[in-house]
Image (cartoon, rainbow, N blue to C red):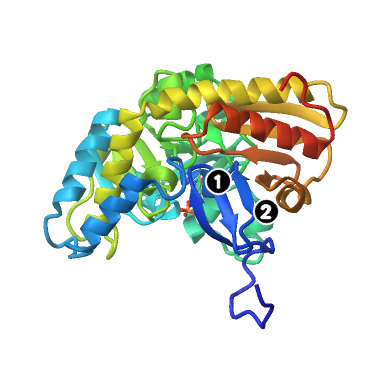
Amino acid sequence: MTQTVSHLMRAYARQPVSFVHGSGARLWDERGVEYLDAIAGIAVTSLGHAHPEVAAVIAEQAGMLLHTSNVFRIEWQERLGRRLCELAGMEKAFFCNSGAEANEAALKLARLYGHSRHVQQPQILVMENAFHGRTIATLTASDNAAKQRGFEPLLPGFLRAPFDDIEAVRRIAEASPNIVAVLLEPVQGEGGIRVASPEYLRALRILCDRQGWLLMLDEIQCGLGRTGRWFAHQHAGVVPDVMTLAKSLGNGFPIGACLARGAVADLLSPGQHGTTFGGNPLACRIACTVLKIMRRDGLPDRAALLGERLLAGLREALGNHPDVIAVRGLGLMVGVELSRNCKELVGRALAEKNLLITVTRDSTIRLLPPLICSEEQIDDIVRRVVGLIGAEAERL
Ligand SMILES: *Cc1c(COP(=O)(O)O)cnc(C)c1O
């Protein structure tokens, strides 16, 4: 790529690579060099790149109708709402264009719910290490001082608890009568791949019922098959009151969803919330196709199998490595925490191993491969990551 003056704001420290096309878990740059994709655009392209059925549906719908408006009925939106609610045991859906927007809808619902119960200053309990997006409300809900710095004042109405610690939530509950909802990720992604225990989620469900709080789960990264179940909370056997989705729902086409059940599902009245683009025929038809393929091809089960293989391979090769603090994850959401800042590994993985990874919280290598990977590709990811950290992949 020729280096000229960039007209892009410096929101990203970009790698000096630009991809031209892809297929499944593979990508090619402008020089024709092939790469293995172990991040799927941050848990977005779960079906891999250039999935032929998704491409065909985009072309067909683009030739029919892209957009009308939410002031009209949209058949594909109604179908997608039905499909998602059936899958998740929810009742109603609101569609938007991104994860942050889905969480904005959830946060607005929580406040509306609070006011419906005559709580004048409703508060929402969020978690340490959380990530919920970059709008002002979702940035406030996130726990990352570096990302918040410079954007103050943040919003009032949030309290924070340590993650996966039910006693801490109980203590906060006693002191805080204005809490109306809890928002958390069942598996924290940006926070370093931290898995909430099933016991914690079950205890939280009981506590929310007792306190009259909404249990709101952000499954934007961990949902839609990635952890080995359709939704990560299903490992614990609980059902949330509100759940947000985005990322892999469109396999790269922007779409977000806020699902709800019970009293909160019917709180919105016409005019209270809205979006121009959200839920348009193209986005919703693509998402219907993504869900159909995931179900037909058994991708949640496949993610469980591949995830075990990935974790086992990494643990075997790196379990005793002096630089490795932990290898953890659920399904195809895997983190390797090192004892040092390892942000430089992203560039080294690209240049030396032709491998796409990310590093989160400075010291955790995050792997989010597409759910359609072959076993060989999973083993290949293990080999390349292990080689990068500097150990020998045994028995591979
Ligand atoms: C990516 C992500 C978001 C934000 O989604 P955007 O589409 O980038 O707005 C929110 N929550 C979680 C858990 C995420 O992983």
* Disc sitting over residue 254 in the figure: none
Residue ID for mark 2? 145
- The yes-or-no answer for disc 1 within 8 Å of ligand 1 is no
Left or right: where does residue 108 sit relative to residue 270?
right
Question: What amino acid is labelled 2 in the image?
Answer: Ala
Judging by the rendered image, the residue that carries numbered circle 1 is: 26
Q: Secondary structure at mark 1?
A: strand
Q: Residues within 10 Å of mark 2 (few under 14, many from 20)?
A: few
Tell me what residue is drawn at x 66 percent, y 83 percent: 5
Point out residue 34 in the picture as x, y percentages from the top left corner: 62, 50
Where disc 2 sits, the SS reads helix
Task: From the viewer's side, name the closer residue of 52 and 288.
Answer: 52
The extreme front residue here reads 32
Query: Looking at the image, is mark 2 or mark 1 earlier in the sequence?
Result: 1
Q: Quadrant of residue 197?
A: top right
Q: For residue 38, what is the image quadrant?
A: top right
The amino acid pointed to by label 1 is Arg
> Where is residue 47 drawn, in percent x and y?
42, 41
The residue positioned 53% from the left and 40% from the top of the image is 126
Q: Quadrant of the C terminus?
A: top right
